[in-house]
Image (spheres, rainbow, N blue to C red):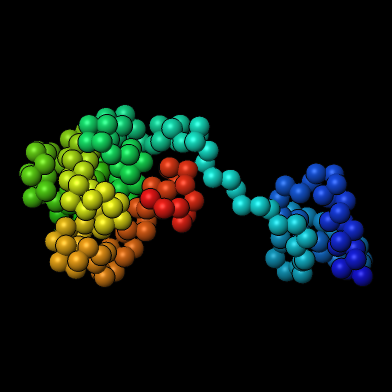
């Protein structure tokens, strides 16, 4: 009975164009059938319509999405100067500091892109807590890593976290450090999201 009713209701919903979200069917204490798009705890439901996955960010939405990120102008300038995707810099900043310009790690890395003191000096950054200087220095370093690893984003990002030697000494693979194994997917997930790419899209 439930199955035939479900099929009938499903047909009606599809014909009327209602199928825009999850739809559940349940039976109340009086034996009446209830349709809802909310799954309430304590009730037994059968889902009759499953909401389709949300569409990826379209290409025309992507620039606006990046423009709405914090420090968008500074990131855009650094990305252009270093021939990097702005989305990649945003992904690193988000993962490194969550856009906190005053962030300092236990290891002594500082600022938006969490530059270590030696890296900051090498990139000409005098004040890691200055957002413009930090982003420019981090972008310059990331560009160096992209060149070193033949534009392999995953390896460059791994090297940004663990150091280039940790990647090179293992023959060009992501080091097996727990932090790096978490870090790389986090950055790549943010990068793909801002690029409007699917979660498994090739980079």
Viewer can see residue 129: no
Q: Position of residue 30 (x, y in %)?
A: 92, 66
Could you say which quadrant of the image residue 132 lies in? top left
Quarter holding residue 108: bottom left
* Residue at image location 86% in from the left, 54% down from the top: 11
In the rendered view, does 59 fall on the left or right side of 177? right
Position of residue 9 measured from the top left corner of the image (x, y, whole percent): 87, 56
Q: Can residue 2 be seen by looking at this rendering? A: yes
Q: How many circles with numbers are drawn on the protein?
A: 0
Where does the N terminus fall, quadrant-wise? Answer: bottom right
Residue drawn where x is 26% and y is 57% of the image: 155
| Residue sitting farthest toward the front | 150
- Identify the residue at image location x=43%, y=42%: 195
Q: Nearer the viewer, residue 4 or 30?
A: 4
Quarter of the image where one finds residue 41? bottom right
> Does residue 5 appear to the left or right of 42 in the view shown?
right
Residue 3 is left or right of residue 193, and the answer is: right
Q: Is residue 52 left or right of residue 145?
A: right
């Amino acid at each position: 009975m439930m199955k035939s009713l479900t099929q009938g209701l499903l047909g009606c919903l599809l014909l009327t164009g209602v199928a825009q979200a999850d739809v559940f069917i349940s039976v109340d204490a009086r034996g009446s059938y209830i349709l809802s798009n909310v799954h309430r705890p304590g009730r037994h439901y059968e889902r009759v319509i499953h909401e389709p996955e949300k569409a990826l960010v379209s290409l025309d939405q992507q620039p606006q999405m990046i423009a709405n990120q914090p420090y968008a102008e500074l990131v855009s300038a650094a990305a252009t100067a270093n021939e990097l995707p702005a989305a990649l810099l945003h992904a690193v900043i988000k993962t490194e500091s969550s856009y906190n310009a005053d962030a300092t790690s236990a290891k002594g890395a500082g600022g938006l892109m969490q530059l270590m003191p030696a890296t900051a000096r090498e990139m000409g950054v005098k004040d890691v807590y200055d957002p413009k200087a930090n982003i420019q220095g981090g972008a310059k370093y990331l560009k160096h890593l992209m060149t070193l690893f033949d534009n392999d984003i995953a390896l460059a990002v791994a090297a940004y976290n663990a150091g280039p030697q940790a990647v090179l000494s293992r023959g060009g693979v992501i080091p097996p450090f727990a932090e790096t194994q978490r870090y790389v997917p986090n950055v790549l997930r943010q990068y793909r999201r801002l690029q409007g790419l699917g979660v498994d899209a090739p980079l």
